[in-house]
Amino acid sequence: MVKITKEAALEYHESGRPGKIEVKPTKAYRTQTDLSLAYSPGVAFPCKEIEADPSTAYKYTAKGNLVAVISNGTAVLGLGDIGAMSGKPVMEGKGLLFKIYGGIDVFDIEVAEKDPEKFCEAVEKIAPTFGGINLEDIKAPECFYIEERLKRTLDIPVMHDDQHGTAIISAAGLKNALEVNGKDIKKVKIVVNGAGAAAISCTKLYMALGAQKENILMLDSKGVITSDREGLNEQKKFFATDRHDAHTLAEAVKDADVFVGLSKGNVLSQDMVRSMAKDPIVFALANPVPEISYEDAMASRPDVLMSTGRSDYPNQINNVIGFPYIFRGALDVNATAINEEMKLAAVHAIADLAKQPVPDVVNDVYNNDDLKFGPAYFIPKPVDPRLITEVSAAVAKAAMDSGVARNPIKDWDAYKNGLRQLLGQETKLTQQLYDRARKHPQRVVFAEGIDPTMLKAAVQAKAEGICQPIVLGNDERIAKLAAELDLSLEGVEVVNLRHDREAERREKYAKILAEKRQREGYTFPEANDKMFERNYFGMMMVETGDADAFITGLYTKYSNTIKVAKEVIGIQPAFNHFGTMHILNTRKGIFYIADTLINRHPNKETVKDIAHLAAHTVRFFNDEPVIAMLSYSNFGTSKDGSAATIHEAVAELQEEYPNLAIDGEMQVNFALNQKMRDERYPFTRLNGKKVNTLIFPNLSSANSGYKLLQAIDDDAEIIGPIQMGLNKPIHFTDFGSSVRDVVTTAAVAAIDAYVSKKKKNNSK
């Protein structure tokens, strides 16, 4: 774990724009009309609508996606009562987490008021602004009163995350840890060290899961809380025990099954852990120093199941696993509260998620291919992209079932898709591709079956119903790799193309290829040798109809793949060239870029083919092409080099395809700035149209262009490369492709194969 220094932290918060959050407009504002709609006089109309029906505030304002993070600074992290203003960096940080994990906007509000009554009055007066309120860093016991009162007086969700966030995550962890150890929550003995807001809330939630009050011992700074102790507040009094055989922590943990620490560092010794029951569970959640270090706990005995609040050890209890998604689900149904049913729904959703196969993106972040449910992994990681769909949906459903939802969800699939799109996990375009592929799953060959990424992609594509995968490679090695990655190969066909049992098929393919290319010097023995190579064999599967589509490229050079594709598959008769396209899904819309991989220095005829193929491909994605032919000059200002080539190609393309929206040559800024282009060059065929297709003058500029955007814009989605112009659906991947990238390519290949079959059948 990187050591965080004071200097680094201060520099982080000070550099650039001070602080961690900002407000951005969500509507157009550049013209006088925009401003008149945004403010006076246009703003009067939504004001009147809200006056007539207050619920329309969720329709016309940001209320439904706006949460207040409110604190008086009396219990800031481990710093104590440092005051409202001093706690502001923490509240901004909470706002950052709400946004990046839940897509929720936040105003952080620091209230300089310690009196609970006056604090509540202040919050109640500003509550109409918000769709929900997250109370933060307020000391006990005042926090209990404040939360209860605000839940009673307000009609929006209110949650004190310091209490319930830790409770929800630790309850999910405890549920799963007990399952790993084979213990019954109704029978286990639990010791809770700490009696503050988090400890009280955690313990109550454990009881909601089935823990028995008589099996729980709670300790504060004075020791075990017993019923004969004087001066106990109501919360502590509830957990006071009648037992008098345990007063110290050492006495309490003897023979206990579970230790939950919500206190301070280094209070639990190795001897205390050794005194616990068989297969003990230790949740040492004090931060940054836990009640016992991970190393000491694991060294004390081999059967301990350990969790901390730190990210550098397994099974981190991290509130970010819960609060963004709990509020997300509550906001999405316009809930009036966050109730116990919603909290328990979150517990079960988080616990269940840990039992599912871990996504590749999580393994990549933690540099671990072996994350699976068990002692070292019984709580999902904070970066798990499925949390927003699983937890938010569970909370929303619980809100509906418990009667606090004002805007119930009707289409759960659409809701989950919307959540993925909200955080950029899965765009509308990607979802459309998957849905189209699922309607007609095709037989797709995955060339590099012994590559972990491609094997995972094949299994995932099968699981999602996108295609019927055929994996090429040594069957024994693939089976071993699948076992190591905990992948099921059920429904995945594995073809060992070098095995003796494939000899007859190799000879068949070799004979067909030799006959096809006999006028190019091919002989049968030469063709037969090539059938031991996965690209030749796999493409021949598609050529002969033994498969419908083929994917390759994770560690194959493009130059070799291109050569094989030309030999085996060939270029469509209407063209002399083929190319590739990348789709960029950006904040400004979808852009189609070509040619990104194949033609290094295209001449006029090549450029024309690329443009024509690009138009076909854009239509394949149910879009209408508006094509800008790019160069370093505009409409003939340069008579040399690529500018002249593009200029001549455009003239011929416009004559051959009079209805195609295409023009150039032009610089990229004019292509993408419609207003500037139309004012400067009103004669263009693109006048009044928004360009969505960019044809670059050479491979270097096209390849660099899409990779530059990919490198500088984390929010841009890149799909491709997409093959254009070959006779059969042969598709490529990039060297750095993720599992999700390959699955998306499989979806494109499957759709391509189905469309090709349909065209062939219609032409008969």
Image (cartoon, rainbow, N blue to C red):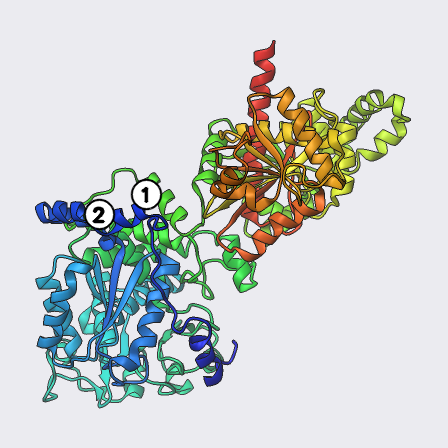
Graded by Cα atoms within 10 Å as few (under 14), some (14 to 19) or many (20 or more), the crowding at tag 1 reads some
Q: Residue 415 carries which label?
A: 1
Q: 187 above or below 553?
A: below
Q: Position of residue 379 (x, y in %)?
A: 40, 62
Q: 506 above or below 128?
A: above
Q: Quadrant of residue 141?
A: bottom left
Q: In which quarter of the image is residue 577?
A: top right
Who is closer to the viewer here, 236 or 14? 14
Q: Can residue 558 be seen in this view?
A: yes
**Under tag 2, what secondary structure?**
helix
> What residue is rendered at 59% in x and 27% in y?
616
Q: Is residue 259 visible?
A: no
Residue receiving disc 2: 60
What amino acid type should be assigned to the residue bearing mark 1? Tyr
Q: Residue 251 carries which label?
A: none
Q: Position of residue 288 (x, y in %)?
A: 40, 81
**Under tag 1, what secondary structure?**
helix
> What residue is rendered at 43% in x and 54% in y?
385
In the image, 511: left or right of 217? right
Who is closer to the viewer here, 319 or 195? 319
Q: Going from the N terminus, do you reach mark 2 or mark 1 first?
A: 2
